[in-house]
Amino acid sequence: METDRERGDYLDPNAGKVRLEELGPRWLGSRSVDPATMVNYEGKWRIHVQPTFGGRQVKSIRPSEIAQWVTELGNTSSPALAHLAFQVLSGCLELAVADGLIKQNPAKSKIVSLPAIVRPDIVVWADETVGRVIQSHPDQFRLIPVIGVACGLRQGEIFGLSLDDFDFDTGLIRVRRQLKPVGKTYIFALPKNDRERFVPIPPFIEGQIREHVERFGTLKCTLPWERVDGSSTTVDLLFQRQSGGHIRSRDYHSMIWRPSLAAAGVIPPPVKDDRSRLRYKGGSNHGTGMHTLRHYYASVTLADGVNIKELAEYLGHHDPAFTLRMYAHMLPSSHARARQAVQKRLMGLALPLPEQSRSSADEEVA
């Protein structure tokens, strides 16, 4: 203890007796994140971290216990959930280190390994499937999947669109907000990664948008900006529910999206439960969720020569490297182009070639 005091490493042995449940609210209160992320953090603390470690003194929490806990979470729930719950626990313990309650964060021990998150292969629908899904949508909501496949916007960004966001003279959409659920309420917020962007729009979509507005009008909607207690923002929304009010993502998913998939033959027809309610199987995973429309947009643009950097900008990704990892397998093969480019250049050097190679080269260049 005297040596530690001289080194400046001394910790009061009683300091580590603080229970983790005292640190959890303090750590949550120190986070500067968007409201939806905070809801996620609070849920993982309440459901997974606090019941297991909340009553424990921070100095008594061992790396082996954390390793076993996170492995069980990955097996019983999902690797992604285990990662987020671990982030909350590790953050609370790091706060204990910063406050001088413990010397080291046991969550950072080498024996603690997080379960691997396996990204499923991206499923891209055929043109015929996309057409059937669009046609299966009710008239009032048909423009939603059209914008999804034509512009690659996220669901919340489509629901938050206003007619004012379209500049048909330049052929661009200004993506500047999303309609975002926070718990049981909704807010307007910046698009994911907190930045606006411009996305090119195909000419044919102008007529469809104007027809939609003429038939169904727009909705003047006032919601908080960025936070539930944020300043009020009013937007003339392009889409609204049949009963009035802005679209709620859960309602759209259950009442419009999944029935349209079933009608298009993408998922099985619904079955009735014991209360005569229709139940659908599928429609929310990586191959049948609304995000599939973005994958279709990416495949079409890449096939026609749009590069990864441009696509990352249009999709609103934070880093082109992320876009490349996600869609590299969709890039058209450049083997033939590379062969022809090098062949033409070498032919221009007038290198001596055997007669057989010369004739073959002429044929390929031709």
Image (spheres, rainbow, N blue to C red):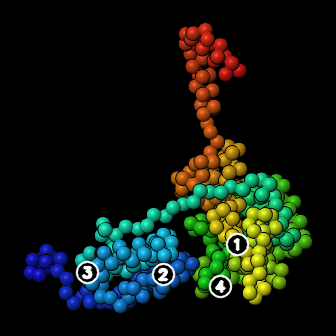
Which of pointers 2 and 4 indicates the residue nearer the eye?
2
Measure the alpha-carbon separation of dots 2 and 3. 23 Å
**If the image is split into quadrants, where does the C terminus sit?**
top right
Counting from the top left corner in percent of width and height, residue 231 is at: 63, 83
**Image marks 2 and 3: residues in contact by CB distance under 8 Å:** no
Q: Helix, strand or loop at disc 3?
A: loop
Residue 54 relative to residue 234: left or right? left
Residue beneath label 1, please?
Answer: 281
Q: Earlier in the sequence, mark 3 or mark 4?
A: 3
Kind of residue indicated by mark 4: Thr
Mark count: 4
- Checking the image for residue 102, the label placed there is 3
The quadrant where residue 338 appears: top right
Residue beneath label 2, please?
Answer: 44
Which of pointers 2 and 3 indicates the residue nearer the eye?
2
Q: Earlier in the sequence, mark 2 or mark 3?
A: 2
The quadrant where residue 107 appears: bottom left
Would you place residue 292 above or below residue 47 in this image? above
**Front-most of residues 148 and 329:** 329
The quadrant where residue 356 appears: top right
**Crowding at label 4, few (<14), some or many (≥20) Cα neighbours within 10 Å?**
few
